[in-house]
Image (spheres, coloured by chain):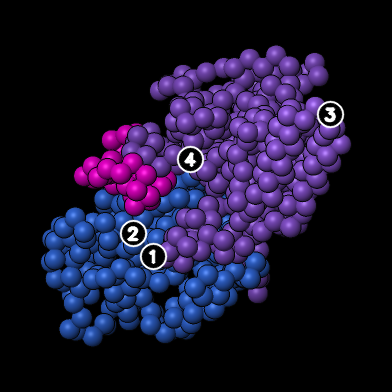
């Protein structure tokens, strides 16, 4: 059990490195049923339900086995233990927006390898591989639509894309989402799911912290609400910027949220970390979250906040 | 600064050490042979040291610059406070949890004008390094810094921050007290400060820990410093899955002052004395002072609202992407 935990701790670092080196259940395996295998599939959301029978998903927490369809109907939350599976921006948009109707924004912005960064693989190649294997444009997607009848701009991360890492594209898209909110007087929500900064963009990735916060300060001046939803995991550059300055900060149950990764902390202090460390419940207890919201209550809760802000 | 033999030498500084040793040999010879004049040769060697200092820093690799930024003899924030300013008056505590010794700050006078100076502080010996937590601040350090910045804003005093940290401290208590939130809040609030802000990286500029006091109208780097999103060691361990690629990671990250200035991510590079700031504290401080004084005068001319807008736009333009 302990090793499984630490594996999960390392998970986001591996994702940011671009490969999953974790043995056993990897993130990719866990969620591959929800992600698209090929690029350019345009299956309508209604048809998506017709996933062939025989695909089973085992909950990493309680080992409960459910069919993909059952899990999807339950918003990718384990029916047995309430474990919130990691999902992508497409799923969040479907869950949040009324009648699953929304308009995607800024999909035309793509990452580029300005620094010619090469680690075990050139960054350029890494990006091309990701574009090939998924239809995601980058680690963040933006959409606007109605939530419980009230308009909301949602910028949502995809952990699947280089660990939801914060790079120039994420920074720029968040700024444009904020601009859109400002222009149309619509509240903004950012759904964080990130291992931290995109190291392949070096200092440019660090500069996305002041870049995004500068733009959010304009929202604050204009009195436009900004809601932050932290999901599993929310780390590093995201925590040290927009994720932690929401007018309202929410989190999904048991999400791992922190500044430094658990492995780094463990290596620094040379002690075991307490049970539940850096989980949503831990942050709520220490005063850094407004509330923990189950995925099934998310839409209603948001609607309530939007009404409170509006009235 | 420490004098030989109390100086410490990095591996690539070994030729300088050899010259010092030679001087010592000649000096002891001089003591024993009073009839031979050694002053000429000693002077020659001293000149050779200065030439060597310049020589060595002319062709440093990125990793060597990282090493230089961490040189144990390098001047830290408090050294600059005392040498650039008069009447530095330290202020303590975040009014909430405690006084973080890794973050120092207070009022100081820049040729008669009061400013607020803030910076991470590393220890100058083994004991003090622990007291200062190696320059790694906890959330209360960032909150102390913010308190001082707000104080400066209230009384319309410009702010000058000195950045030198291997990172914000990764500890259990730091997480409990919201390390991420503290840094995020600082960045957010620094963006909106109504007074001029100058930030100077004087040593290590590691990621969020540096950015927590790093949002300014002008962000400057000393010549032999680095500033990026992760230390080369950690980058190596994550991306190369081994600690052995720190030199490569340092090259790839393009984290040195020349690159950062070329990318437009910092507004200027402040030169250092030949061989690095650790060779001459007075001169290093003077060079910083000479650089920031006209900048500050320039910034004060700009109306506050415009200055804030410029700040937001400056950082807002940072990033690279393709737009289809």
Q: Which residue is mark 4?
A: B168
Q: Which residue is mark 1?
A: A14
- Mark 1 and mark 3 in contact (Cβ < 8 Å)? no
- Element type where label 4 sits in the image: loop
- Mark 4 and mark 1 in contact (Cβ < 8 Å)? no
- Mark 2 and mark 1 in contact (Cβ < 8 Å)? yes
Q: Could you tell whether B111 is left or right of A181 in the image?
A: right
- Element type where label 2 sits in the image: helix
Asked whether B320 falls inside the magenta stretch, the response is: no
- Element type where label 3 sits in the image: loop
Viewer-nearest residue: B233 or A226: B233
**Marks 3/2: CA distance?**
71 Å
**Marks 2/4: CA distance?**
20 Å
The residue depicted at 49 percent of the width and 59 percent of the height is B235
Q: Is residue A109 above or below residue B46?
A: below
Chain B visual colour: purple
Q: Could you tell whether B298 is left or right of B9 in the image?
A: right
Where is residue B236 drawn, in percent x and y?
Answer: 48, 61
Q: Which residue is mark 2?
A: A10
Q: Residues within 10 Å of mark 2 (few under 14, many from 20)?
A: some
Q: Which chain is blue?
A: A
Q: Residues within 10 Å of mark 3 (few under 14, many from 20)?
A: few
Q: Residues within 10 Å of mark 1 (few under 14, many from 20)?
A: many
Q: Which residue is mark 3?
A: B35
Viewer-nearest residue: B316 or B147: B147
The residue depicted at 60 percent of the width and 39 percent of the height is B8
């Amino acid at each position: 059990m302990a090793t499984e935990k630490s594996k999960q701790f390392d998970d986001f670092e591996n994702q940011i490195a671009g490969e999953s080196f974790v043995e056993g259940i990897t993130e990719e395996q866990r969620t591959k049923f929800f992600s698209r295998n090929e690029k350019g599939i345009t299956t309508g959301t209604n048809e998506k339900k017709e996933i062939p029978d025989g695909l089973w998903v085992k909950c990493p927490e309680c080992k409960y086995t459910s069919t993909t369809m059952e899990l999807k109907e339950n918003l990718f939350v384990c029916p047995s233990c309430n474990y919130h599976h990691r999902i992508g921006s497409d799923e969040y948009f479907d869950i949040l927006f009324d009648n699953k109707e929304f308009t995607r924004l800024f999909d035309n912005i793509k990452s580029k390898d300005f620094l010619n960064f090469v680690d075990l693989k050139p960054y350029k190649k890494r990006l091309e591989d990701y574009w090939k294997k998924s239809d995601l444009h980058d680690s963040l997607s933006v959409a606007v639509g109605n939530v419980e009848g009230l308009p909301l701009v949602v910028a949502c991360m995809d952990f699947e894309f280089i660990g939801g890492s914060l790079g120039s594209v994420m920074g720029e898209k968040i700024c444009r989402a904020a601009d859109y909110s400002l222009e149309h007087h619509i509240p903004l929500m950012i759904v964080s799911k990130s291992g931290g900064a995109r190291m392949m963009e070096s200092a440019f990735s660090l500069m996305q912290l002041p870049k995004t916060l500068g733009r959010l300060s304009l929202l604050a001046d204009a009195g436009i609400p900004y809601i932050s939803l932290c999901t599993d995991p929310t780390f590093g550059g995201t925590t040290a910027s927009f994720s932690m300055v929401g007018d309202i900060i929410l989190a999904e149950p048991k999400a791992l949220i922190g500044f430094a990764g658990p492995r780094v902390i463990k290596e620094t202090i040379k002690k075991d970390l307490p049970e539940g460390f850096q989980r949503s419940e831990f942050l709520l207890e220490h005063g850094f979250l407004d509330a923990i919201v189950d995925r099934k209550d998310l839409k209603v809760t948001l609607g309530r906040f939007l009404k409170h802000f509006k009235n | 600064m420490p004098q030989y033999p109390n100086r410490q030498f990095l591996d690539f500084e070994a030729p300088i050490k050899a010259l010092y040793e030679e001087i010592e040999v000649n000096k002891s010879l001089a003591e024993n042979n009073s009839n031979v004049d050694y002053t000429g040769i000693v002077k020659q060697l001293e000149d050779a040291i200065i030439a060597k200092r310049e020589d060595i820093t002319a062709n440093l690799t990125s990793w060597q610059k990282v090493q230089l930024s961490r040189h144990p003899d390098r001047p830290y924030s408090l050294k600059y406070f005392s040498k650039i300013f008069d009447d530095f008056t330290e202020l303590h505590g975040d009014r909430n949890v405690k006084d973080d010794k890794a973050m120092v700050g207070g009022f100081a006078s820049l040729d008669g004008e009061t400013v607020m100076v803030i910076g991470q502080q590393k220890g100058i010996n083994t004991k003090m390094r622990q007291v200062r937590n190696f320059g790694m601040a906890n959330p209360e350090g960032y909150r102390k810094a913010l308190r001082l910045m707000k104080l400066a804003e209230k009384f319309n005093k410009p702010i000058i921050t000195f950045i030198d940290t291997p990172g914000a401290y990764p500890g259990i208590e730091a997480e409990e007290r919201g390390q991420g939130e503290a840094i995020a809040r600082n960045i957010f609030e620094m963006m909106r400060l109504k007074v001029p802000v100058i930030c100077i990286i004087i040593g290590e500029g590691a990621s969020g820990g540096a950015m927590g006091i790093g949002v300014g109208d002008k962000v400057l780097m000393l010549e032999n410093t680095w500033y990026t999103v992760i230390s080369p060691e950690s980058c190596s361990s994550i991306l190369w899955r081994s600690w052995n690629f720190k030199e490569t990671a340092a090259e790839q990250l393009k984290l040195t002052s020349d690159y950062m200035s070329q990318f437009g991510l910092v507004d200027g590079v402040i030169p250092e004395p030949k061989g690095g700031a650790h060779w001459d504290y007075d001169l290093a401080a003077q060079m910083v002072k000479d650089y920031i004084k006209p900048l500050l005068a320039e910034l004060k001319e700009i109306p506050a609202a415009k200055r804030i807008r410029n700040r937001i736009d400056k950082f807002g333009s940072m990033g690279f992407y393709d737009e289809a």
